[in-house]
Amino acid sequence: MTEPLYRAEQLTRRYRNGGTEVLALDNVDLTIEPGRRLGIVGESGSGKSTLVRLLAGLDRPTSGRIWFEGTEITSLPERRLGFLRAAVQMVFQDPRSSLNPRMRVGDIITEPLRSRLVRRQLPGGVDHATRLAEVLEAVDLPADSGGRYPHEFSGGQRQRIAIARALAPKPEILIADEPVSALDVSVRAQVLNLLTDLVAAQGLTLIVVSHDLMVVRHLCDQLAVMRAGRIVEQGDTETVYTRPGTDYTRALLAAIPRIRTAG
Amino acid sequence: MSLLEVRDLRVSFGRRKIEAVRGVDFEIAEGQRLGVIGESGSGKTVTALALMGLLPDNATATGSVRLRGNEIIGAPEVALARLRGDAVSMVFQEPMTALDPTMRVGRQVAEVLRLHQGAESGPARDRVVSMLAEVGLTDPTRIADAYPHQLSGGQRQRVVLAMALINSPDLVVCDEPTTALDVTVQALVLQKLDEVLTASGAACLFISHDLAVVSQVCDRVLVMLDGEVVEAGTVAELFTDATHPYTRGLVATARLELTRPGQRLPTVEDFYAPEARLGERA
């Protein structure tokens, strides 16, 4: 049997918030096979963002372990996580806060390539200008975008910049945390199409976090439903979507606003 | 006479007089609910601010906005302050910025009541608690004594809704009231909004970029594009007989469920090319 891309065992994460303790993640087990597209859905506070932050190595679990391609990452010090930083890239919800307004787009996109940790993992002599041109083309932004600043772009274009930055170090895994929630519905379709195309063209493994089941259904072939720090339902997206196994999933499905024409 | 009459409303900003709203006309009758959809920058919010008399100082508004026959454009601040919160009220996108973080929410709701009706604190509190219950908050006395940061996003937005409705206004302006909320909470807030509007008989101007959300509350919809109303009609009409290509694009992008997962989604550009828009602007 081949080793899964990610294997997580009994992940628990507690936060201290003032005097109270919050159990954000409660004994979660998870396996992700390479090339899959996993959607994680749930309401605010269900632990979905905490889970992906742990997978990306941006945070450490209170207890539990994570293996990435067979290597345990939960016990490694930051200086030895370079391979993970190069292989896993993230796109966040709001490109207004995830892009530095004082940096030119070209510098933003090539920044991961300049990281000491990531640089060592990349094949020697990656030309930054060439890679910049490649990823700008991949996300369908004008070739001269590199010299401009984020505020000169619209919301949808800024999310493309964030995606281009994530693609720059040629990652194996793309983690998108609410990638279209801050965007207009009219722009949402473009960014979703872009993600679908990129994942197919570059053979990426995709992890999408969203409170919107329709977005996840469109992008992902596997689905995990989270509530209060636990995965309450997991499986093939179409199965969960058409035959939800828990009342909670049914409630999430019922909450999707549908166009109402009666009355 | 309609409750609200907007005639040739134009709003421009700054010294260069850049027009954000370019000649908008519409009416809202008593108790009617009108949705406004369009993307960021289409002029929806500026239109709403103009009819509340809340435009920033660097904005110039021309044309006419009449609420119950009272002209809003150019009216003195004193007259506007009397109308706001009483005849017309507003629910904003982000409840955390609409609420004062240092004040218990019950007092904030009571403030609206005291300003406009001169109510005493004791009876005002009873009204506040019953209003909080009306917007679907369980345990309203506890909520009234809480500070905004102690409440969830959905609870905060319902507090703002209670504030907007407590003086039984004729018109409630909602600007993206559920955009910052989770889908489940959004469904609940929309349902409560629908209930309280029905109960009070207030008219509503509901702004959103999401046609599906607008259709939960409104029957009639205006479509705004680059500061102009390009289409108006019922939700059903927009679906079957949209005349403007941009509207057809919006309708297509609003329905993710019609596309098979993984297949290409229709975009607005499939219907309405940006080249044509640039040409129009030039």
Image: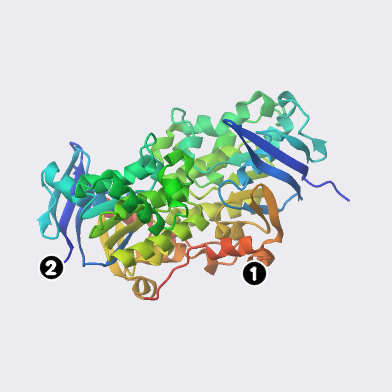
| Mark 1: secondary structure | helix
| Mark 2: secondary structure | loop
Q: Is residue A210 left or right of residue A84?
A: left
**Circle 2 residue:** B1
Outermost right residue: A1
Q: Of the residues shown, which amino acid type is indicated by label 1?
A: Thr
Of A129 and B121, nearer the camera is B121
Q: Is residue B48 visible?
A: yes
Image location (x, y in percent) of residue A16: 62, 32
Image location (x, y in percent) of residue A78: 71, 26
Q: Label 1 crowding class (10 Å Cα cut-off): few <14, some 14-19, many 20+?
A: few
Of A150 and B9, nearer the camera is B9
Image location (x, y in percent) of residue A262: 40, 76
**Circle 1 residue:** A242
Residue plotted at (42% across, 53% down): B178
Labels 1 and 2 in the same subunit: no
Quote the CA–CA distance across marks 1 and 2.
50 Å
Q: Quadrant of the C terminus of chain A?
A: bottom left
The chain identifier of the residue carrying mark 1 reads A
Residue plotted at (76% across, 33% down): A74
Image location (x, y in percent) of residue B5: 16, 61
Q: Is residue A11 left or right of residue B16?
A: right
